[in-house]
Image: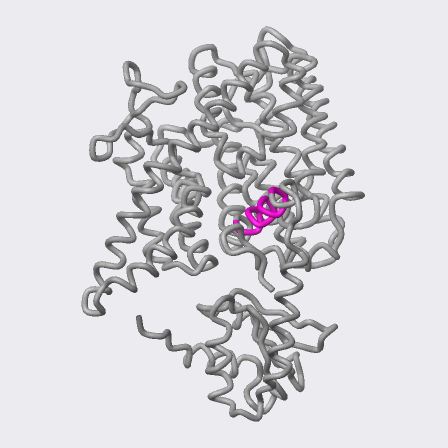
Amino acid sequence: MAKTDYSALAKQIIELVGGPSNINKVIHCISRLRFYLKDEKKAQTDKITSLSGVAGALYNSGLGQYQVVIGPAVADVYDEVIKQLGSGFADDKATAEAVEETAEEAAANRPKTLWGWITRGFQLLIGTITGSMIPIIGLLAASGILKGFLTLFTFNLHWIDTKSTTFIIINAMGDSAFYFLPILVGYTAAKQLRSEPITVAAIAGVLVHPTIAALWAAPTKGMATIMGIPLNATFFGLPIHIPQYTYSIFPIIFAAWLARPVGNWLKKVLPLSLRAIFQPLFTLFIVTSAVLVLMGPVISLISGALATGINFLVTANEAIAGLVVGALYQTLVIFGLHWMIVPIISNDIAMTGHSVLNGLVNFTMIAQGAGALAVWVKSKRADIKGLALAGALSSFAGVTEPAMYGINLKYGHVFWTASIGSTVGCFIAGLFHIDMFGFTGSLIGFPSFFSKTNPNNIWVYLVAAVVTLVVSFLSVYFWGFTDADLDKGKNAQKKNVFKGAVN
C-alpha cells in the first residue's frame, strides 16, 4: 500500500496559518500540529477546518500555540510541513515531550469505571451526532418554519387546499430536507468521520429509495415476526425487517463510520487499476448490507419494545405516562427510536379520530423550543442567537431537530434542563386526561385540542403548554446555559464515538 501524499494538505495548512513568514516553530503531539505563530490572528480557522484531512483548529492561549487537529496521520503531515518549511522550523525535543505529555494525559483521562465508559461513550456519541448535523441545521430550521406556516395556512386558516398542486409543491419544499435527511447527514458525517462522502451519500440514497420505503409502508398482516416486528423482506434468503429510514440519522452515521475501515481495507487489497470503480462498488454493497441486516432490525426491536411499553402506560395511567413521555420522548428522537411510536399515533387518529399519546408528545416539542428560546434571550453572541431563534420557531411549528441538534444537545445542559419542563407539562396534561384530535402538535397545533365532547380539553392544553414554556425557559436560563458553554460545545464537535477524544 503506497503511503498517502500529504504535500498538498501541508502546503494549504502552511498558507492558511499565515505562511512561512508567520511561523516561528512547529511541533506535534499524538493528533495535532502545534504552530508557534508570530500573529495568531492571521490564521484562517474556518478555511483550515474545512480542509479534507483536518478535524478542527483552535488557538490555545495558555500554551501560545495554534493547534491543527489531524488525527492518526499527524506525524506524516508534520514531516511534510517540515519538508516544505525547512528543518529550522522543527523542534524534535519539544515534539517528543508533547507526544509523551498528551499520551499520558489521554491515559490519565481514560475512564476507570463501567459508568465512566458509558458516560464517555454517550458524550462522544452526542458529539458525533451534533457535529454531523451542524452544517445542515439552518436548512432544517428553514424547512421546519416553512412546514409550520403551511400548516397554519392550510389546516387553521384554510387558505390553501390540501388537494391543490400549490400545497403539494410547498409541502415538498418543506419536506425535502427531512425526507432526504439521511443523504444530507451521510455526506456531512462522512466528512467528519473521514470516510468517502459521495459513497456514504449513495448508501443513504439506498435507504430512502422509493422501493425500500415501499417495503416499510406495505401491509404486514400474516408475515412472520420477531418480538412483534414483521420480517417484511429477505436478503439472500435471510428474513429481515426494513424500518422507516427517511427522517432518520443514526443508521447512516453508523454507515459513515463503517465505510472508513471497509474503504481502507479495500485500498489495501485492490490493484490500483481497479480501485476507482471497485472500491466504491464494494463499499456500497458491504456497508449497505450491514445497515439493512444489522442496524435496521436492532433499532426496530428497541423502538418496538419502547413503543409497547409507552402505549401500555398511556392505557394504564395517563399521568405516569406523561412523566415518562415528557422525560424521554425527545431522547428517542435523537436516535430515531420514535418511529415505532408514530404508527401507534397514526393508527389512533385513523381509527378513533384522536390520540392521547400524541397529546403528550406535543409538550416535548414545546419544551425544546422554550429551551432554545432561553438561549436566544441569554446569549450575547449574534450567531448563536440567530440559530437559537430559528430552532425555537421551528420547534413551535412542530419540528424539534434544528433546536436539538443546533443548540440544545450541543451547549451546556440545555436539552436536559428543557426536558424538566416537558416532564412537568406532560404530567399535568396526563393528570387532567389530555386528548388530541389531529396530528400537528406544538404551539402551532393548538386547534388539534378543541374537542366537541370535552370543552375543557383546550384549557388543559393551554395550562400545560404555559407551564411547559415557563419551566423549560427558566430551567435553561438559570441552570442550562451560559455563553461560556459555547467553547465546550465547539470542543464536543472534535469528538466522536468511533475515534474517541481528539488530543
Q: Is residue 446 above or below residue 470?
A: above
Q: Nearer the viewer, residue 475 or 38?
A: 38
Q: Nearer the viewer, residue 91 or 195?
A: 91
Q: Nearer the viewer, residue 228 or 392?
A: 228
User: Which x, y percent locates residue 1?
Assistant: 30, 70
Verify whether residue 127 appears in magenta: yes
Q: Is residue 434 above or below residue 232?
A: above
User: Which x, y percent locates residue 325?
Assistant: 61, 25
Which residue: 32% across, 59% down?
265
Verify whether residue 122 appears in magenta: yes
Picture quadrant of residue 225: top left
Picture quadrant of residue 486: bottom right
- Quadrant showing the C terminus: bottom right
In magenta, the rendered stretch is 118-128
Q: Chief secondary structure of the magenta span?
A: helix
Which residue: 38% across, 35% down?
296
